[in-house]
């Protein structure tokens, strides 16, 4: 007998449009880093999580003067619509910036974007259909993994070591993909001061990776936001400088000037550049013109090379504080990378510890980090965490590592009590090899 209407179950849901969204939205998830911000930004918490540039040493009086002059003298042009490719003046200046890494480029092949994040989004948009394969390092930048997920690609991780991406593992991953009847659309790599691993590809390694890519007819997307922030010597020549026809280069002013202007770029082979401009126009009509004029005026009227040197020394001091703190406070069995530039250290935990599971205890101890699983598409990384030294003061970094060391020591002691003893003396600073290169391709 049918139940009375008053007894029938009526389900409710928070989103009335859940059945109408495109399939690609199913892969969209909140960034693990953004999810930490509400807690990590509390003043009592030492945040070693976010990669927020430190602009304390930026001369705001100079920037303010530049902006005032820009509005007074060029405001009507700077606050109008512009070119979908970006303003000619800043594209020429971008070519000058890239020359520091050995790149010889023409402004016509530069597309200005809303940070290099949008550049990566546009590259993925014009190359990838749902189900296509993208190769990237293990680990890889969490923002890139989010883009690849949103476009419904399949990420295949490639092992790396203390010298960056492993060319042998790359060749094996390419072959593993081909055995399934597919071809990888491109390799995404961060060769300089890797986010999150902190390591840098040697010049010899870059040459070998490009050789493998040439043999496989594989496009390389070189993401390089930190390349000018090395602590020792001149920048390593960019991969783009070694092969202009096979490499799409992504750059940004967010780390060498200020992130609030959101000015990045893509340098691409001419035919690819045409597609990028079309994609840019459909997404934004044009990148923000005022930001482009502001950055251009700063580059033209200020010693930006000298300012980068100031940033380098500031970040070097913070890197040194991080390494000192880890050496003093990490328990036996911990290992970490020692970056020669950039923002990040990649910490491997003693056996038996889980960075994701341990995070609530760390936050309770008033220190924050990003668990390693955020930087893999396949669940790997539980024994890793990314530590950022770019924003806190050296004193705060030392305090943060002290708090983190106490948390790790407690967790390790619990494991030892239950028979899972941490091994090693904590001084062998190498990247633990990725254990599943060319993951399940079925």
Image (cartoon, grey):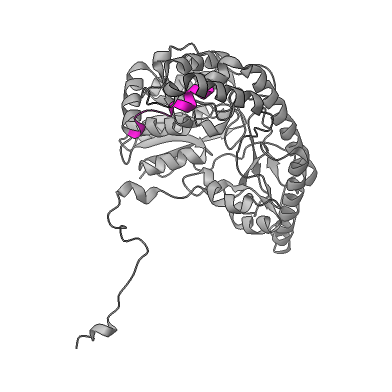
Q: Is residue 126 left or right of residue 33?
A: left
Residue drawn at x 68%, y 25% as measured from the top left: 312
Name the quarter where the N terminus is drawn. bottom left
| Nearest to the observer: residue 341 or residue 328 | 341
Decide which of 43, 172 is in the foreground and name it: 43
Looking at the image, the residue that sits furthest to the right is: 328
Q: Residue furthest left?
A: 1
Image location of residue 419, percent across then percent down: 70, 61
> Could one spot residue 222 in this view of the protein?
no
Q: Is residue 17 visible?
A: yes
- Give the side of residue 38 with respect to residue 133, left or right: right
Above or below, 327 relative to 285? below
Q: Nearer the viewer, residue 384 or 324?
A: 324
On screen, residue 298 above or below 21:
above
Q: Residue at x 56, y 24 (%)?
A: 68
Given the current orientation, which residue lies at the most extreme front position? 72
| Image point (67%, 59%), residue name | 361
Residue at the image point whose x is 57% and y is 20% from the top: 298
165 vs 204: above or below: below
Q: Residue furthest bottom?
A: 1
Q: Quadrant of residue 236?
A: top right
Q: Position of residue 138 (x, y in %)?
A: 52, 38
- Magenta stretch prevailing secondary structure: helix
Range of magenta residues: 283-295
Magenta region includes residue 67: no
Q: Position of residue 344 (x, y in %)?
A: 63, 36
Residue 294: percent from the left, percent from the top? 52, 24
Left or right for 419, reference 17: right
Residue in the foreground of this view, choosing between 96 and 183: 96
Can you say which quadrant of the picture contains the C terminus?
Answer: top left
């Amino acid at each position: 007998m049918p139940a009375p209407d008053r007894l029938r179950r009526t389900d409710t849901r928070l989103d009335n449009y859940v059945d109408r969204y495109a399939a690609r939205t199913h892969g969209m998830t909140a960034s693990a880093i953004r999810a930490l911000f509400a807690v990590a930004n509390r003043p009592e918490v030492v945040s070693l999580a976010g990669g927020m540039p430190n602009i304390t040493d930026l001369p705001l009086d100079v920037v303010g003067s530049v902006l005032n002059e820009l509005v007074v003298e060029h405001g009507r042009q700077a606050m109008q619509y512009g070119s979908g490719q970006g303003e000619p003046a800043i594209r020429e200046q971008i070519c000058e910036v890239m020359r520091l890494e050995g790149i010889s480029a023409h402004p016509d092949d530069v597309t200005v974007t809303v940070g290099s994040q949008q550049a990566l989004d546009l590259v993925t948009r014009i190359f990838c259909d749902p189900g296509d394969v993208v190769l990237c390092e293990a680990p890889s930048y969490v923002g890139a993994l989010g883009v690849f997920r949103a476009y419904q690609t399949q990420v295949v991780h490639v092992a790396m070591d203390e010298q960056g991406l492993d060319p042998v593992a790359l060749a094996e991953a390419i072959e593993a993909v081909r055995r399934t009847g597919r071809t990888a659309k491109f390799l995404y790599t961060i060769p300089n001061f890797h986010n999150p691993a902190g390591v840098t590809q040697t010049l010899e390694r870059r040459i070998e990776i490009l050789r493998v890519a040439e043999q496989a007819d594989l496009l390389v997307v070189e993401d390089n936001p930190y390349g000018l922030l090395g602590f020792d010597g001149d920048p390593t020549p960019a991969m783009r400088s070694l092969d202009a026809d096979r490499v799409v280069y992504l750059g940004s002013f967010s780390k060498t000037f200020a992130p609030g202007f959101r000015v990045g770029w893509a340098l691409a082979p001419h035919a690819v550049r045409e597609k990028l401009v079309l994609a840019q126009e459909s997404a934004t009509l044009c990148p923000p013109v005022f930001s482009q004029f502001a950055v251009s005026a700063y580059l033209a009227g200020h010693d930006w090379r000298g300012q980068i040197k100031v940033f380098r020394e500031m970040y070097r001091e913070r890197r040194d504080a991080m390494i000192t703190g880890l050496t003093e406070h990490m328990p036996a069995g911990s290992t970490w990378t020692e970056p020669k530039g950039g923002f990040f250290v990649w910490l491997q935990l003693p056996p038996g510890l889980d960075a994701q599971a341990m995070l609530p205890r760390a936050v309770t101890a008033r220190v924050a980090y990003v668990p390693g699983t955020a930087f893999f598409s396949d669940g790997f990384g539980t024994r890793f965490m990314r530590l950022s030294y770019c924003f806190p003061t050296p004193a705060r970094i030392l305090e943060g590592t002290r708090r983190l060391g106490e948390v790790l020591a407690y967790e390790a002691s619990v494991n030892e009590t239950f028979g899972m003893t941490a091994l090693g003396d904590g001084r062998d600073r190498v990247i633990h090899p990725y254990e599943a290169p060319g993951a399940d391709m079925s």
